[in-house]
Image: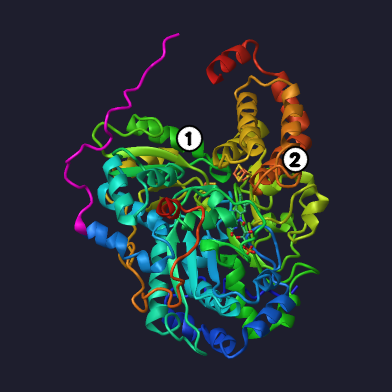
Amino acid sequence: MAAYEPVLLRNRGVEGSTSLKVYESRGGYQSFKKAIKMTPDELIEEVKAANLRGRGGAGFPCGVKWSFLPKDRKRTLLCVNADESEPPTFCNRVLMEHDPHQLIEGTIIAGYATQAQIAYIYLRVEFHEQFHILQKAVDEAYAAGYLGKDIGNGYKLDIYLHRGAGAYVCGEETGLIESIEGKRGEPRIKPPFPAIEGLFRMPTVVNNVETLSNLPHIIERGAAWFTGIGPGHSSGPKLFCVSGPVKKPGCYEGPMDITVRELIDRDDFGGGMVSGKKVKAVFPGGVSMGVLTADELGMKMDFDDPRNYGLLGLGTAAAVVVDESVEMRMVLRNLARFYGTESCGQCTQCREGTGWMHKIATRIAEGAGRLEDLDILLETARNMGMMPGLSICGLPDGATYPIETIVKKFRSELEESIASQPQGRSDLVLSVLN
Amino acid sequence: MSWKTIDRTLPMVEPGAAPVLSDALRAKIKSFFPRYDTKRAVLLPALHVVQDALGHVSFPAMKEIAEVLEIPPSAVMDTLSFYTHFWTHPKGEKVVTVCRSISCEVMGGREVLDAVKLQLGVEEHQTTSDGKYSLATEECLAGCDYAPCLLINEKLHKCVKASDVPKLLADAGNDKVSMPRSDLFDGPKGDASGPSDLPDKVETTSDVSEMREAD
Ligand SMILES: Cc1cc2nc3c(=O)[nH]c(=O)nc-3n(C[C@H](O)[C@H](O)[C@H](O)COP(=O)(O)O)c2cc1C
Ligand code: SF4
Ligand code: FES
């Protein structure tokens, strides 16, 4: 197989890659100059033809989302989702750290295509270095005339960085919108969708950092080039994260035809497990998509194959490897705690469901579980979320899949650990927990 | 069972006390107005500005922020209480935020957290008696390729081993990132005039300020 030429990460490792000078010297902002001569509709058609699917987790086609904007709108607002808080995802961080101008150029192209005049980059507060890198790049872009009044063709765009303050649910697009408005990051009931009524009740587009970083390349090389990369409905370059006890944890790029096993083992990806460790389980798409056993590593990292393994989807394509030394009940507790503490609490089923799953998973982890707890977990998981129509946002669906797949795929291990609990332990733990 | 009663008549803001927000801070908060359609949207930037300058956001500070943004103080508290990043009481000079999510746990994050607790002698959400350190935990910090990791103020410490912790916490410069930067919230150098074609009044029914205006 011919070596893959990185696209999104092509500037990583280049000396001074965050500066405008270096970015321009490597062909940067040429796509912007090309795009600004096209009409917004031509741009939207090009992105539609490329079938660029959102990289933020849901995989919704970007061009189609843009075309939902009302034709007679007076203003449009653009929000860049750089909240990146799904464990164990860090590809947006890598993009901003190494190539902030690629994101800015993509944002300008998206802004022009949707005729937005303001773009807010919603950055999670823990991204300190990335904030400074990005703000500096924005300043440079203003100074060079890529941002501000009349940047070409009478178009005007301001980019403002907006820092979050530590809440997973602010990554959800309407939670993000509420948060920019200065409110609690509680997601909104949809419809109306943001494209119709979003930030400040204006038509709004929310796009992920990686989605936007693809745009300059689509404009430069065309939709046909883009669809030529990767399989079927999963076109274009994709970033994959791999973490856990592998030799080379990190962010890698490739077409979406690699398998989870390749992601872990190949020398140009994870480089294999560190010596003495064996794969027990992998969460391949961020934790919210669910878990794979060591026998299921043939899964392809594309938008379709995860479903065949009982997972929710490709998610953020960030894989964490759990090795044999880790007990699944500890993993179960870690994830249950995550959703339990990050639910915003608006919807009863989500608030109570994730809360109870946290409690049950904690007592299983502490050695006070009961065998019937596993069925209670499954029942709870099935009875919350957007899919059964019981919640405002997708957070509880993202909680259902990992909990359900852990319990189903690792049931015998969990049953064994419950059965082998020391006598009297449950009384002790329950008295502490309740 | 005895019911514990709280004296709700105690004022959380002393009447007649000197303002806690300096004119410079107020000006900095106001410099964000052109960026947003509503003043309420400046709340998160304002809370960041105040916490960065004063260490935490006290009740008097909340009240004064509310005045600057022309929203009720309860709206400030409502928003603030949602986010884990803001402190309503004094915190330590440095906040150690240990990641507790899955990659870090698999790579030994729990031992790192225990080592930090042992070294500082505090539990989560507590501050050392010398006021130097506060301890917090957070979900995934998006540094999983460097798991286990922790944040000290703005610096991410990567691949931390439990045995590194004493040395790490003793290091004076452990909370700073050295890089060229524009001042934390300085606006863009070019055109900061804000949107040119703003509607006179934006309808945001869920906006408390608007509701109050309607009263
Ligand atoms: C609970 C929850 C958390 C989310 N967190 C993020 C996030 O951190 N970053 C992100 O880009 N999208 C996140 N999303 C997805 C967004 O709602 C939205 O689909 C995405 O930003 C759209 O951008 P895209 O079409 O470019 O992918 C989250 C969704 C949910 C339900
Ligand atoms: S589903 Fe959960 S996180 Fe989403 S809005 Fe409802 S309570 Fe909040
Ligand atoms: S799990 Fe700790 S940084 Fe992601």
Is residue B14 highlighted in magenta?
yes
| Same chain shared by disc 1 and disc 2 | no
Which amino acid is tagged 2? Thr
Q: Residue at x 26, y 31 (%)?
A: B129
The span shown in magenta is B1-23
The residue tagged 2 is A405
**Residue beneath the point at 77% across and 58% down:** A300
Q: Which residue is mark 1?
A: B111
- Which corner quadrant of the figure contains ligand 2? top right
Taking the magenta stretch, the answer to whether it contains residue A364 is no
User: In the displayed structure, does residue A207 sit left or right of residue B88?
Assistant: right
Measured Cα–Cα span from mark 1 to mark 2: 27 Å
Q: State the quadrant of the C terminus of chain A.
A: top right
Image disc number at residue A434:
none
Q: Chain of mark 1?
A: B
The amino acid type, in three-letter code, at marker 1 is: Glu
| Residue drawn at the location 74% of the way across and 62% of the way down | A258
